[in-house]
């Protein structure tokens, strides 16, 4: 039998919750590659009233409970659906985290590797945040 190893991106969050992607990676024997995208939050301006504190709380609740991203933003003024052209983005990639294949991972297995992943992402952010002016003084929040 031939096995094909293809890179796969699994966005964090969604129906599986914050650790769902770890469980999936353990079940199928995928490695994790921590990444962080600096500058992404500057590509669009959030329109009023979606930037108000009450709207932010509502959007956060929808994202956490229903896996629903909401908001209305404007990027490039001549073509609002396009990102702002003058914003520099930078993607940094950390060290690969090799995971064992566990058909039925326990909650402890998932939590152990999730903590390792969070630690790697946090260190990656701290090492590189000063490369982008908008992130130089920002602390990373993981929730």
Image: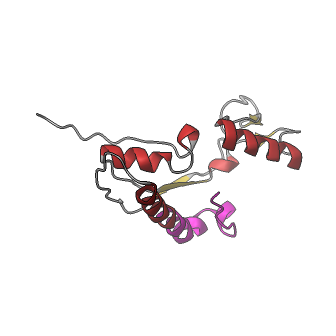
Residue 80, position in %: x, y? Answer: 73, 30
Q: Is residue 52 visible?
A: no
Q: Position of residue 71 (x, y in %)?
A: 76, 36
Secondary structure of the magenta portion, mostly? helix
Measuring from the top left, give residue 56's x and y in whole percent: 81, 46
Residue beneath the point at 44% across and 55% down:
110
Q: Nearer the viewer, residue 117 or 75?
A: 117
Closer to the camera in the image, 57 or 42 = 57
Colour basis: secondary structure
In magenta segment, residue 117: no
- Position of 127 relative to 16 (above/below): below
* Residue 112, above or below 53: below
Give me the residue at 60% from left, 69% from top: 130
User: Can you see residue 137?
Assistant: yes
Name the outermost residue toward the left: 1
Q: Is residue 133 above or below residue 83?
A: below
Q: Residue at x 66, y 62 (%)?
A: 141
Q: Magenta stretch containing residue 138, yes or no?
A: yes
* Residue shown at 60% from the left, 52% from the top: 88
Specify start and end residues of the magenta stretch as a single range: 120-143
- Between 43 and 119, the residue placed more toward the observer is 119
């Amino acid at each position: 039998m031939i096995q094909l190893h293809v890179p796969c991106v699994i966005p964090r969050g969604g129906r599986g919750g914050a650790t769902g992607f770890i469980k999936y990676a353990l079940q199928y024997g995928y490695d994790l590659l921590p990444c962080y995208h600096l500058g992404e939050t500057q590509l669009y301006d959030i329109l009023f009233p979606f930037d108000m504190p009450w709207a932010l709380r509502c959007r956060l609740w929808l994202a956490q409970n229903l896996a629903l991203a909401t908001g209305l933003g404007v990027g490039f003024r001549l073509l609002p659906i396009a990102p702002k052209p003058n914003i520099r983005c930078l993607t940094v990639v950390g060290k690969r985290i090799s995971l064992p294949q566990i058909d039925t991972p326990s909650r402890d297995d998932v939590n152990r590797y999730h903590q390792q992943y969070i630690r790697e992402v946090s260190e990656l952010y701290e090492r590189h945040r000063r490369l982008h002016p908008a992130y130089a003084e920002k602390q990373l929040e993981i929730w």
